[in-house]
Image: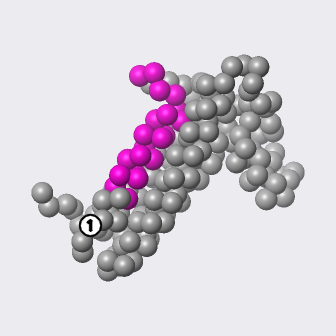
Amino acid sequence: MKLPSYRIVNLAQAFGSLLLIIIAIAYFERSLNLEPCYLCMMQRGVIVAIGTICALAAVHNPQQFGQKVYSSLSLTLVLAGIYFSGKQLWLQSLPGSHVPSCGFPVRHLFENFSTIEAITMLLQGDGNCADVRWQLMGLSMPGWVMVCFVGFGTIGVIQFLRKS
């Protein structure tokens, strides 16, 4: 079976990440009025970064070494995304007495703390990250986002291993 070109696959990944962000903002935030928690924001940032890397790879359309560099960057981001999704799933599995206390809203963090302090707080998550506010077929939102990261990772591995 012949795979689509390297450029087409990267464009599809960039479009997929854009679609995920649009769904997150238009549907979950605007329609369902779900406020994203700290780890949700980190996962969104990773999805945007993956989309950006894939868009740059599509525009640049490098030879094999460059393809491996872009794929490696994408795979590194996928691992970060899986970490954030996994951490949120872990927080959601904790009994109520072990859930950390809730923190400030994300906007408040960046308005009142240095960027480094705000990012450190985002990386840790808080009690809001443990709330399961939406599910589909028994999986909460970070579970579905992890499925997306696994998909991006699978494509990244294929892109890394393919010959020009």
Q: Residue shown at 45%/66% (left/top)?
A: 72
Q: Residue shown at 63%/46% (left/top)?
A: 41
Quarter of the image containing the N terminus? bottom left
Q: Is residue 64 above or below residue 144?
A: below
Q: In which quarter of the image is residue 124?
A: top right
Query: Considering depth in this image, is 12 or 71 the residue closer to the camera?
Result: 71
Q: Is residue 142 magenta?
A: yes
Q: Find the residue positioned furthest to the right.
A: 112
The rendered magenta stretch, by its main secondary structure, is classed as helix
Quarter of the image containing the C terminus? bottom left
Q: Does the magenta stretch include residue 90?
A: no
Q: Locate residue 127, reporting x and y percent.
A: 74, 30
In this picture the colour scheme is one colour
Q: Residue shown at 45%/21% (left/top)?
A: 138
Q: Residue shown at 19%/60% (left/top)?
A: 3
Which residue position is annotated with label 1? 162
Q: Is mark 1 on a helix, strand or loop?
A: loop
Q: Locate residue 43, reporting x and y percent.
A: 57, 47
Q: Is residue 65 above or below residue 124?
A: below
Query: Considering depth in this image, is 133 or 151 the residue closer to the camera?
Result: 151
- Specify few, some or many for label 1: CA neighbours under 10 Å numbering under 14, 14-19, or 20 or more: few
Q: Find the residue positioned furthest to the left.
A: 1
Whether residue 136 can be seen here? yes
Whether residue 31 can be seen here? no
Query: Considering depth in this image, is 16 or 85 the residue closer to the camera?
Result: 85
Q: Quadrant of residue 14?
A: bottom left
Q: Locate residue 80, reporting x and y percent.
A: 56, 53
Magenta stretch? 137-156
Q: In this view, does 144 lie above or below 71?
A: above
Q: Locate residue 146, reporting x and y percent.
A: 48, 41
Q: Which residue type does callout 1 highlight?
A: Arg
Left or right of 76: which side holds 54?
A: left
